[in-house]
Image: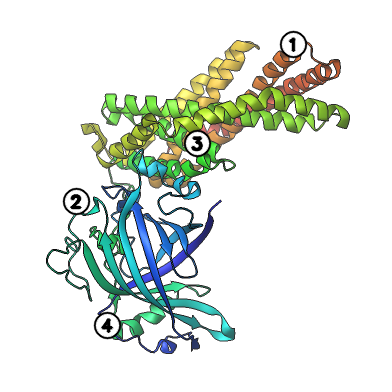
Amino acid sequence: MALQAVEVEKKYDVGHDAEVPSLAEIPGVVRVGEPHVDTLEAVYFDTASHTLASRDITLRRRTGGVDAGWHLKLTVEGPRSGDGSGGSGSEPQRRRELHAPLGQPGVVPDSLLAHVLAYLRGEDAAPVVRLKTQRTTYALYGADGVHLADLADDRVSAELLGAAGGAGAAVGDGAGAAVGDAAAPEGEARTRQWREWELELVHGSPELFPAAEEILAAAGALPAKHGSKLAKVLALPARESGAAAGPKSPGIKGPVSDLLTAYLAEQISEILAHDPGIRLEEPEAVHDLRSATRRARSALQAYRRFYNALAVRHLGAELKWLGRVLGVPRDAEVMLDRLRAHTAELPPVLASAVKDRLEDDLGASRDAAHRKLQMAMVSARYFQLLDGLEAFLDNPPVRPGAAAPARKAAVKLVAKAAKRLERAARTARRTHRGAEHETALHQVRKDAKRLRHVAESVEPVHGKHATKIAKAARRQQQILGDFHDSVVARDLLAKLAAAPDLPEAVASAYVTLHTRQVQLAAEAEAEYRKEQKKSRKVLRGTVI
């Protein structure tokens, strides 16, 4: 498991001859520690096309200093597909930093690699840049000796490695020379030197940054044009200060396509955020990624008439595939947890025997499903799906109708989903008890889920009313989810109880558990009937 921390810092470009000012003059700073000098050497890993750096992700192995080891830095807030600037300008950076031991020089630790596989998408991360830094650190202390922050005065020498020089601009091209940049001698375009200051919080508050601004600016410091040393040496274009990150927020007068773009962007971010959790087998990661996948698919289906049919159909099919691959281990986890809980209601001696039997019967299939999921998530098909989702977001294949006003079009989208749910509910009421009735209620659940997702997507233009509809649909979905789980558990227990050579006590316990599931299903259905009546006023007509 990698160690994690959130760093909050701001970088400044300074001239080679600049003098570090009297840092004790910064408001709130009481004392400045003696300067400490370290020599750091870091090798940065990326693809030849700078896949990680273009998203403001840095992966390095650094020696020297107190935190020698592998470091992975990810933006806490920022664009889905960054430009490498890391939010340069007046605002400090917030980045999540993960550490792992030094290990082998060319082998990225699995605990860090898991966090970038969804971005590498089958490509290898290789050394692209080597940085040598002479760092002088000044510790800033406040009242009661609190360590507020560190100012690092870095003199940096950078060298491009391997094919990195051919993948992008020549070192120093494209972004303009920053204060203090040293031009590389002719024939040595793969190297560069510069100086920068870095103010990083330790236990201080962000108010320290504006407090320090005047003191540092008077010494010649300017806000850095790049958010990281790697972005600077690769000459990735810098984002303008205050530039909007990601898709713009939908407006009441904007086009309906903005609603899908914003909602889909959220789901893509969720998929990428929870991807590492599945690889590292973290609790709830499968559930969270599956939920984002379902939301993306629901939204695409709801807005499909505004987009190229073939593109929507293809993405929908691939999202359905991913949802199915995620669903098998997730459903197995849910079923095992459910039956464990109900087994605990049995007499202790019997509960122990049944629990062991359930682990044998269900644990193996759950583990096999997890293995299949892990294989799917390193497959070309999965990575192509991620590419396809981002391509859809970056270049939406819109039809002319996508320019329709968002507020008016949203009403029709929600109304259509609500009518679909009402039809499913009527079908369920007409069916008799048994498999047909249970299938009909399962369809109600799916349609409630679709309405919930559509209502969520229109919240930017319909606010509280859309939220109210989403909550009503969610309550029906959850109740019918419990009903469906009871039905699945009931059928599973009937199958397990019929197994040959089953100890009589275990078979009897399975029958008891089976009866319990039948009871829970009946209770869930009764609760659904009450909830449907309660939410009918909210959903019927769906005037928003």
The kind of secondary structure element at disc 4 is loop
Q: Is residue 75 visible?
A: no
* Labels 3 and 4 touching (C-beta < 8 A): no
Q: Amino acid at mark 2?
A: Gly
Q: Residue at x 14, y 69 (%)?
A: 185
Q: Nearer the viewer, residue 89 or 62?
A: 62
Find the distance from the CA under tag 1 to the CA under tag 4: 81 Å
Label 1 sits on residue: 498
Camera-side mark, 2 or 3:
2
Which badge, 3 or 4, is on the more N-terminal residue?
Answer: 4
Find the distance from the CA under tag 3 to the CA under tag 4: 50 Å
The kind of secondary structure element at disc 3 is helix
Find the distance from the CA under tag 4 to the CA under tag 2: 34 Å
Q: Residue at x 23, y 67 (%)?
A: 192
Q: Position of residue 110 (x, y in %)?
A: 49, 46
Q: Position of residue 494 (x, y in %)?
A: 72, 14
Q: Amino acid at mark 4?
A: Gly
Q: Amino acid at mark 1?
A: Ala
Q: Position of residue 356 (x, y in %)?
A: 76, 28
Which badge, 2 or 3, is on the more N-terminal residue?
Answer: 2
Which badge, 1 or 4, is on the more N-terminal residue?
Answer: 4
Res 166 label = 2
Which badge, 3 or 1, is on the more N-terminal residue?
Answer: 3
The kind of secondary structure element at disc 2 is helix
Label 3 sits on residue: 291
Which badge, 1 or 2, is on the more N-terminal residue?
Answer: 2
Vertical arrangement, residue 317 with respect to residue 238, above or below: above
Label 4 sits on residue: 220
Camera-side mark, 4 or 2:
2
Camera-side mark, 1 or 2:
2
Find the distance from the CA under tag 3 to the CA under tag 1: 34 Å
In which quadrant of the rendered image does the C terminus lie? top left
